[in-house]
Amino acid sequence: MRRHLLFLALIIAYLVPAAGKVTAQNNFMDRLNKNNTALLITDPQNDFLKEGGAAYALVKDNLNQLGTVENIDALFRTAKKAGLAVFVSPHTYFPHDAKWKDRGPLQNTMKQISMFLVSNPVTYKNFEGSGADFLDQYKKYVLDGDTTITSPHKIYGPDSNDLVLQLRKQGIQNVIIGGLAANLCTDSHMRELIESGFNVIMVKDAVGAPGADAYQAALTNYALIANAVFSTDEAINLMDKLN
Protein backbone atom coordinates (compact mmCIF):
# COMPACT_ATOMS: atom_id res chain seq x y z
CA MET A 1 0.00 0.00 0.00
CA ARG A 2 2.79 2.41 0.93
CA ARG A 3 4.53 1.64 -2.36
CA HIS A 4 1.34 2.45 -4.27
CA LEU A 5 0.96 5.74 -2.41
CA LEU A 6 4.59 6.63 -3.07
CA PHE A 7 4.15 5.85 -6.76
CA LEU A 8 1.04 8.04 -6.93
CA ALA A 9 2.86 10.85 -5.13
CA LEU A 10 5.70 10.66 -7.64
CA ILE A 11 3.25 10.84 -10.56
CA ILE A 12 1.54 13.90 -9.09
CA ALA A 13 4.88 15.54 -8.30
CA TYR A 14 5.84 15.08 -11.94
CA LEU A 15 2.55 16.28 -13.42
CA VAL A 16 1.71 19.24 -11.20
CA PRO A 17 4.67 21.42 -12.25
CA ALA A 18 3.49 20.88 -15.80
CA ALA A 19 0.00 22.14 -15.05
CA GLY A 20 -1.07 24.47 -17.81
CA LYS A 21 1.13 22.82 -20.42
CA VAL A 22 -0.10 20.56 -23.19
CA THR A 23 -0.65 17.13 -21.65
CA ALA A 24 -2.17 15.17 -24.53
CA GLN A 25 -0.23 11.96 -25.04
CA ASN A 26 -2.68 9.92 -27.10
CA ASN A 27 -3.86 9.90 -30.66
CA PHE A 28 -7.31 11.44 -30.16
CA MET A 29 -5.82 14.66 -31.57
CA ASP A 30 -5.45 12.94 -34.93
CA ARG A 31 -9.18 12.22 -34.99
CA LEU A 32 -10.37 15.79 -34.41
CA ASN A 33 -12.36 17.38 -37.19
CA LYS A 34 -14.96 20.13 -37.62
CA ASN A 35 -17.83 17.70 -37.28
CA ASN A 36 -16.80 16.02 -34.03
CA THR A 37 -15.23 18.95 -32.16
CA ALA A 38 -16.96 21.80 -30.34
CA LEU A 39 -16.19 24.85 -28.25
CA LEU A 40 -17.86 25.08 -24.85
CA ILE A 41 -17.88 28.23 -22.72
CA THR A 42 -19.24 28.05 -19.19
CA ASP A 43 -20.89 31.04 -17.49
CA PRO A 44 -19.91 33.86 -19.91
CA GLN A 45 -22.21 36.11 -17.88
CA ASN A 46 -22.19 39.59 -16.39
CA ASP A 47 -22.00 38.53 -12.75
CA PHE A 48 -18.53 37.16 -13.46
CA LEU A 49 -17.25 39.25 -16.35
CA LYS A 50 -18.74 42.73 -16.09
CA GLU A 51 -17.54 45.35 -13.64
CA GLY A 52 -20.15 45.60 -10.93
CA GLY A 53 -21.25 41.98 -11.37
CA ALA A 54 -21.97 40.04 -8.19
CA ALA A 55 -18.74 38.01 -8.35
CA TYR A 56 -16.62 40.28 -10.55
CA ALA A 57 -14.53 41.60 -7.66
CA LEU A 58 -13.57 38.04 -6.72
CA VAL A 59 -12.21 37.13 -10.15
CA LYS A 60 -11.16 40.44 -11.71
CA ASP A 61 -7.45 40.15 -10.84
CA ASN A 62 -7.21 36.73 -12.46
CA LEU A 63 -9.26 37.91 -15.46
CA ASN A 64 -6.91 40.84 -15.99
CA GLN A 65 -3.75 38.77 -15.54
CA LEU A 66 -4.86 36.18 -18.08
CA GLY A 67 -6.69 38.47 -20.50
CA THR A 68 -9.67 36.17 -20.08
CA VAL A 69 -12.39 38.35 -21.58
CA GLU A 70 -10.50 38.86 -24.84
CA ASN A 71 -9.30 35.27 -24.92
CA ILE A 72 -12.85 33.95 -24.68
CA ASP A 73 -13.85 36.39 -27.42
CA ALA A 74 -11.03 35.04 -29.60
CA LEU A 75 -12.18 31.46 -29.01
CA PHE A 76 -15.76 32.33 -29.95
CA ARG A 77 -14.62 34.22 -33.04
CA THR A 78 -12.30 31.46 -34.23
CA ALA A 79 -14.78 28.66 -33.64
CA LYS A 80 -17.46 30.52 -35.62
CA LYS A 81 -15.05 31.24 -38.46
CA ALA A 82 -13.86 27.63 -38.51
CA GLY A 83 -17.40 26.27 -38.60
CA LEU A 84 -17.26 24.46 -35.28
CA ALA A 85 -20.30 23.86 -33.13
CA VAL A 86 -20.41 26.26 -30.18
CA PHE A 87 -22.08 25.55 -26.84
CA VAL A 88 -22.73 27.79 -23.86
CA SER A 89 -23.65 26.36 -20.46
CA PRO A 90 -25.09 29.21 -18.35
CA HIS A 91 -25.61 29.37 -14.61
CA THR A 92 -29.13 30.57 -13.81
CA TYR A 93 -31.41 30.57 -10.78
CA PHE A 94 -35.16 31.10 -10.67
CA PRO A 95 -37.24 32.17 -7.64
CA HIS A 96 -38.32 28.58 -6.99
CA ASP A 97 -34.67 27.63 -6.44
CA ALA A 98 -34.83 29.66 -3.22
CA LYS A 99 -36.89 26.79 -1.77
CA TRP A 100 -33.85 24.50 -1.58
CA LYS A 101 -33.57 23.12 1.95
CA ASP A 102 -29.81 22.57 2.00
CA ARG A 103 -26.92 24.40 0.34
CA GLY A 104 -23.16 24.37 0.47
CA PRO A 105 -21.37 27.50 1.72
CA LEU A 106 -20.74 28.95 -1.73
CA GLN A 107 -24.31 28.20 -2.79
CA ASN A 108 -25.52 30.13 0.26
CA THR A 109 -23.35 33.07 -0.69
CA MET A 110 -24.63 33.04 -4.27
CA LYS A 111 -28.20 33.07 -2.97
CA GLN A 112 -27.48 35.94 -0.60
CA ILE A 113 -26.02 38.13 -3.37
CA SER A 114 -28.71 37.10 -5.90
CA MET A 115 -26.07 35.83 -8.31
CA PHE A 116 -27.38 34.69 -11.72
CA LEU A 117 -30.96 35.32 -10.58
CA VAL A 118 -33.68 35.47 -13.24
CA SER A 119 -37.27 36.49 -12.46
CA ASN A 120 -38.90 33.32 -13.81
CA PRO A 121 -38.23 30.39 -16.16
CA VAL A 122 -40.91 31.33 -18.68
CA THR A 123 -40.47 34.97 -19.68
CA TYR A 124 -36.99 35.76 -18.30
CA LYS A 125 -38.41 39.19 -17.41
CA ASN A 126 -35.67 41.77 -16.71
CA PHE A 127 -33.04 39.33 -17.99
CA GLU A 128 -31.38 41.76 -20.40
CA GLY A 129 -28.52 43.57 -18.69
CA SER A 130 -28.89 41.54 -15.50
CA GLY A 131 -26.11 39.58 -13.83
CA ALA A 132 -27.39 36.43 -15.52
CA ASP A 133 -27.25 38.01 -18.97
CA PHE A 134 -24.36 37.33 -21.33
CA LEU A 135 -21.52 39.80 -21.59
CA ASP A 136 -22.42 42.29 -24.31
CA GLN A 137 -19.38 41.66 -26.47
CA TYR A 138 -20.20 37.94 -26.62
CA LYS A 139 -23.83 38.34 -27.67
CA LYS A 140 -23.01 38.41 -31.38
CA TYR A 141 -21.71 34.85 -30.95
CA VAL A 142 -24.06 33.50 -28.30
CA LEU A 143 -27.29 34.88 -29.76
CA ASP A 144 -26.59 34.28 -33.45
CA GLY A 145 -29.21 31.54 -33.66
CA ASP A 146 -26.60 28.85 -34.23
CA THR A 147 -24.94 28.56 -30.82
CA THR A 148 -26.46 25.92 -28.54
CA ILE A 149 -27.40 27.52 -25.22
CA THR A 150 -28.07 24.66 -22.84
CA SER A 151 -30.59 24.66 -20.06
CA PRO A 152 -29.11 26.20 -16.89
CA HIS A 153 -26.78 24.24 -14.66
CA LYS A 154 -27.64 24.75 -11.01
CA ILE A 155 -24.62 23.82 -8.89
CA TYR A 156 -21.31 23.55 -10.77
CA GLY A 157 -21.41 20.80 -13.37
CA PRO A 158 -23.63 19.85 -16.30
CA ASP A 159 -25.16 16.94 -14.39
CA SER A 160 -28.30 19.08 -13.94
CA ASN A 161 -28.63 20.40 -17.50
CA ASP A 162 -28.85 19.01 -21.03
CA LEU A 163 -25.27 19.65 -22.19
CA VAL A 164 -24.27 15.99 -22.60
CA LEU A 165 -27.49 15.24 -24.48
CA GLN A 166 -26.95 18.20 -26.82
CA LEU A 167 -23.32 17.25 -27.49
CA ARG A 168 -24.17 13.63 -28.25
CA LYS A 169 -27.15 14.53 -30.45
CA GLN A 170 -24.83 16.73 -32.54
CA GLY A 171 -22.17 14.04 -32.88
CA ILE A 172 -19.57 15.80 -30.75
CA GLN A 173 -16.78 13.74 -29.23
CA ASN A 174 -14.14 16.38 -28.50
CA VAL A 175 -14.77 19.52 -26.45
CA ILE A 176 -12.58 22.61 -26.07
CA ILE A 177 -13.48 24.35 -22.79
CA GLY A 178 -13.07 27.85 -21.39
CA GLY A 179 -15.15 29.98 -19.05
CA LEU A 180 -15.87 30.71 -15.41
CA ALA A 181 -15.05 29.86 -12.73
CA ALA A 182 -11.88 27.95 -13.45
CA ASN A 183 -11.87 25.82 -10.29
CA LEU A 184 -15.64 25.41 -9.97
CA CYS A 185 -18.06 25.25 -12.93
CA THR A 186 -15.37 24.96 -15.59
CA ASP A 187 -13.57 22.25 -13.64
CA SER A 188 -16.86 20.44 -12.96
CA HIS A 189 -17.84 20.50 -16.64
CA MET A 190 -14.45 19.02 -17.51
CA ARG A 191 -14.89 16.21 -14.98
CA GLU A 192 -18.41 15.27 -16.04
CA LEU A 193 -17.54 15.28 -19.75
CA ILE A 194 -14.49 13.10 -19.13
CA GLU A 195 -16.63 10.70 -17.07
CA SER A 196 -19.16 10.65 -19.93
CA GLY A 197 -16.55 9.56 -22.46
CA PHE A 198 -15.69 12.83 -24.20
CA ASN A 199 -12.18 14.04 -24.97
CA VAL A 200 -11.57 17.42 -23.33
CA ILE A 201 -9.09 20.20 -24.08
CA MET A 202 -8.92 22.90 -21.40
CA VAL A 203 -7.88 26.42 -22.38
CA LYS A 204 -5.85 27.62 -19.40
CA ASP A 205 -5.94 31.38 -20.09
CA ALA A 206 -9.60 31.57 -21.16
CA VAL A 207 -10.81 30.95 -17.62
CA GLY A 208 -10.94 32.94 -14.41
CA ALA A 209 -10.74 32.08 -10.73
CA PRO A 210 -11.16 33.84 -7.35
CA GLY A 211 -7.47 34.30 -6.69
CA ALA A 212 -4.10 32.78 -7.51
CA ASP A 213 -4.53 29.72 -5.28
CA ALA A 214 -7.88 28.83 -6.83
CA TYR A 215 -6.43 29.27 -10.32
CA GLN A 216 -3.46 27.04 -9.50
CA ALA A 217 -5.82 24.41 -8.11
CA ALA A 218 -7.70 24.48 -11.40
CA LEU A 219 -4.51 24.11 -13.43
CA THR A 220 -3.43 21.17 -11.30
CA ASN A 221 -6.73 19.40 -11.91
CA TYR A 222 -6.68 20.20 -15.63
CA ALA A 223 -3.23 18.65 -15.98
CA LEU A 224 -4.30 15.50 -14.15
CA ILE A 225 -7.73 15.00 -15.73
CA ALA A 226 -8.09 16.65 -19.14
CA ASN A 227 -6.80 15.07 -22.34
CA ALA A 228 -4.88 18.27 -23.07
CA VAL A 229 -4.30 21.76 -21.70
CA PHE A 230 -3.77 24.52 -24.26
CA SER A 231 -3.24 28.26 -24.28
CA THR A 232 -5.73 30.36 -26.24
CA ASP A 233 -3.22 30.73 -29.06
CA GLU A 234 -2.73 26.97 -29.23
CA ALA A 235 -6.48 26.36 -29.23
CA ILE A 236 -6.97 28.92 -31.99
CA ASN A 237 -4.24 27.30 -34.05
CA LEU A 238 -5.90 23.91 -33.58
CA MET A 239 -9.35 25.16 -34.60
CA ASP A 240 -7.97 26.93 -37.64
CA LYS A 241 -6.39 23.69 -38.88
CA LEU A 242 -9.39 21.39 -38.48
CA ASN A 243 -10.86 19.96 -41.67
Image (tube, helix red, strand yellow):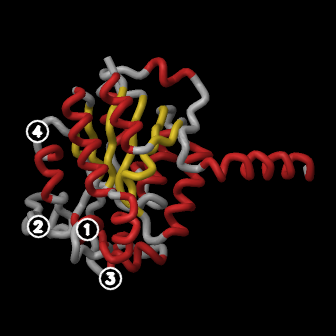
SS class, disc 2: loop
Q: Nearer the viewer, residue 9 or 132?
A: 9
Give, as a three-letter code, the residue at label 3: Gln
In the picture of the structure, the residue carrying the numbered disc 1 is 116
Q: Residue at x 26, y 77 (%)?
A: 114
Find residue 222 and report its horizontal and vertical position in percent: 54, 48
Could you tell me the amino acid type at mark 1?
Phe
Dot 3 and dot 2 residues touching (CB under 8 Å): no
Q: Residues within 10 Å of mark 1 (few under 14, many from 20)?
A: many
| In this view, 48 is above or below 32 | below
Nearest to viewer (mark 1 / mark 2): 2
Q: Which residue is mark 4?
A: 145
Alpha-carbon distance for marks 2 and 4?
A: 19 Å
Which residue is nearer to you in this view: 69 or 160? 69
Q: Secondary structure at mark 1?
A: loop
Left or right relative to 28: residue 98: left
Label 3 or label 2, whichever comes before in sequence order: 3
Q: Mark 2 highlights which residue?
A: 129
How far is the residue under mark 1 from the one under mark 3? Answer: 11 Å
Check the image and name the residue furthest to the right.
Answer: 2
Q: Compare marks 1 and 2 and give the one earlier in the sequence.
A: 1
**Up-down relation of residue 207 to residue 11 (above or below):** below
